Amino acid sequence: MHTFFDFYRDGGVSLILLVAASFAVAGMVKGVIGLGLPTVSIGLLSVALAPPQAAALLVIPSMVTNVWQLAAGGRFLYLLRRLWPMLAGIVAGTWAAGLWLAGRETAWASHALGAALLVYAAVGLSPLRLSVPARAQAWAGPLVGATTGAITSATGVFVIPAVPYLQALGLNRDELVQAMGLAFTASTIALAGDLIHGGQLGGREAWASLLALVPALAGMVLGQWLRHRVSAATFRRCFFIGIGALGLHLLIA
């Protein structure tokens, strides 16, 4: 029978500490600004783990925190009706890319992750605010979803281009937070199916992911506490600068 520590046996205490610190920081970021758990955790874990291994650890903490985020607010059915084409695209894109990548060389994935983080940071720091007209959402939603799914399958990060797209829909703050929770939940489910099919998420990884939930939840509680005591704009700026530096490191390493 698998235990919490089977996955960590080869890496020892240093790997356990890295995982705990990564998910605590990632949870804190998510608690403050409503996103960033996969981006931060996989970015930090990538210094010691391959992207598929890091993505496997992400599954349970991401699912629990996203459902928590999704449950806040009362616009679930409205957002589901409005966003289902994008959500379907996320699932289809993740699984299609997973089938295409199966058995292929994935050494480039860390560089792809670095590029995705740089793009994410650039979008976050940019003063530009995009807007998607209602008439374009019928085709833009599935396209954005499929692209997000393909990036998710390759890197484990599911914010590009889904988050900028959601920010461009003109949702109010509460709707945006809930919409991100909905998109991230769909991405996590699709990623879990992709990893299970590829043999990268089994019993030992599931137990290890469950253990990572503890620091993620602790970090999220701390982040929610900090949200009311630190300027969100200042925190967001520092966050994106850090993400950009990490992305540049992964891209050129």
Image (spheres, rainbow, N blue to C red):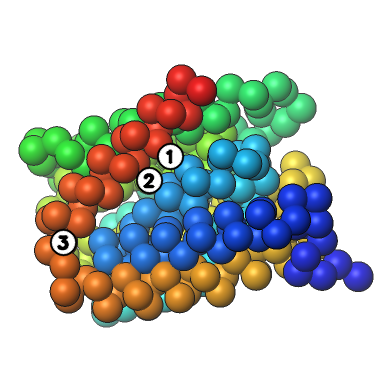
Q: To which residue does mark 2 refer?
A: 159
Residue 72 at what x, y percent from top left?
A: 31, 78
Q: How many discs mark residues in the rendered view?
A: 3
**Identity of the residue drawn at 43% across and 47% down:** 39
**Identity of the residue drawn at 46% across and 20% down:** 252
Name the foreground residue: 166 vs 125.
125
**Identity of the residue drawn at 65% across and 69% down:** 210
The amino acid type, in three-letter code, at marker 3 is: Ala
Dots 2, 1 in contact, CB < 8 A: yes
Badge 1: few (under 14), some or many (20 or more) residues near its Cα, within 10 Å? many
SS type, badge 2:
loop
Of badges 2 and 3, the one in the foreground is: 3
SS type, badge 1:
helix
**CA distance separating discs 2 and 1:** 7 Å
**CA distance separating discs 2 and 3:** 19 Å
The amino acid type, in three-letter code, at marker 1 is: Thr
Task: Give residue 232's mark.
Answer: 3
Which quadrant of the structure image shows residue 92? top right
Of badges 1 and 3, the one in the foreground is: 3
Q: Is residue 151 left or right of residue 72?
A: right
Q: Is residue 146 left or right of residue 155?
A: left
Give the answer, above or below, for where 175 lies relative to 55.
below
Residue 94 at what x, y percent from top left?
A: 55, 41
Name the foreground residue: 181 vs 123.
123
Residue 49 at what x, y percent from top left?
A: 64, 42
Q: To which residue does mark 1 refer?
A: 148
